[in-house]
Image (cartoon, rainbow, N blue to C red):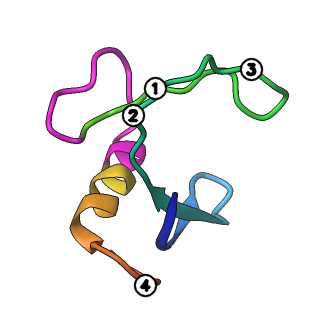
Amino acid sequence: MQFLGYAGFVLAPEQRAEYAALFAGRTAIGRDFQANEEIAAIRRWNLRDALPGRVQPLDAYLARLTREWGTGPSHHQG
């Protein structure tokens, strides 16, 4: 995995500042995911196909940024 940058945003209605680190990577071998207290499930996405089901717009936007940014640390405000 490669660190691509981070994103800062404000969650409503509390106006709480949150930050997310963005990583990208490739794998030839998939492994079974083990749910834990923090993450109940994961989904791999190639950024080209539509995501099925309910996806928060912010999550899709941050995922697309990983493709746009390329390599190296950066910060995007939008």
Q: Which residue is mark 3?
A: 35
Q: Which mark is residue 24?
A: none
Q: Determine if the magenta segment contains residue 58.
A: yes
Identify the secondary structure beneath mark 1.
Answer: loop
Tags 3 and 2 in contact by the CB under 8 Å rule? no
Identify the secondary structure beneath mark 3.
Answer: loop
Residue type beneath disc 2 = Ala
Residue 67: name its quadrant.
Answer: bottom left
Q: Which residue is mark 2?
A: 28
Q: Earlier in the sequence, mark 3 or mark 4?
A: 3
Q: Residues within 10 Å of mark 3 (few under 14, many from 20)?
A: few
> On screen, 40 above or below 23?
above
Q: Determine if the magenta segment contains residue 23.
A: no
> On screen, 44 above or below 57?
above
| Residue at figure coordinates x 36%, y 50% from the top left | 63
Residue type beneath disc 3 = Ala
Residue type beneath disc 4 = Ser
Q: Which residue is mark 4?
A: 74
Q: Which mark is residue 43?
A: 1
| Residue at figure coordinates x 14%, y 38% from the top left | 48
| Residue at figure coordinates x 40%, y 30% from the top left | 44
Q: Spatial distance from mark 4 to mark 2, Cα to Cα? A: 27 Å
Tags 3 and 4 in contact by the CB under 8 Å rule? no
Q: Which residues are magenta?
A: 47-60
Q: Position of residue 15 (x, y in %)?
A: 63, 63
Residue 28: name its quadrant.
Answer: top left
Q: Spatial distance from mark 1 to mark 4, Cα to Cα? A: 24 Å
Q: Spatial distance from mark 1 to mark 3, Cα to Cα? A: 12 Å
| Residue at figure coordinates x 34%, y 61% from the top left | 66
Q: Spatial distance from mark 3 to mark 4, Cα to Cα? A: 30 Å
Relative to 70, is 58 on the left or the right?
A: right
Q: Earlier in the sequence, mark 2 or mark 1?
A: 2
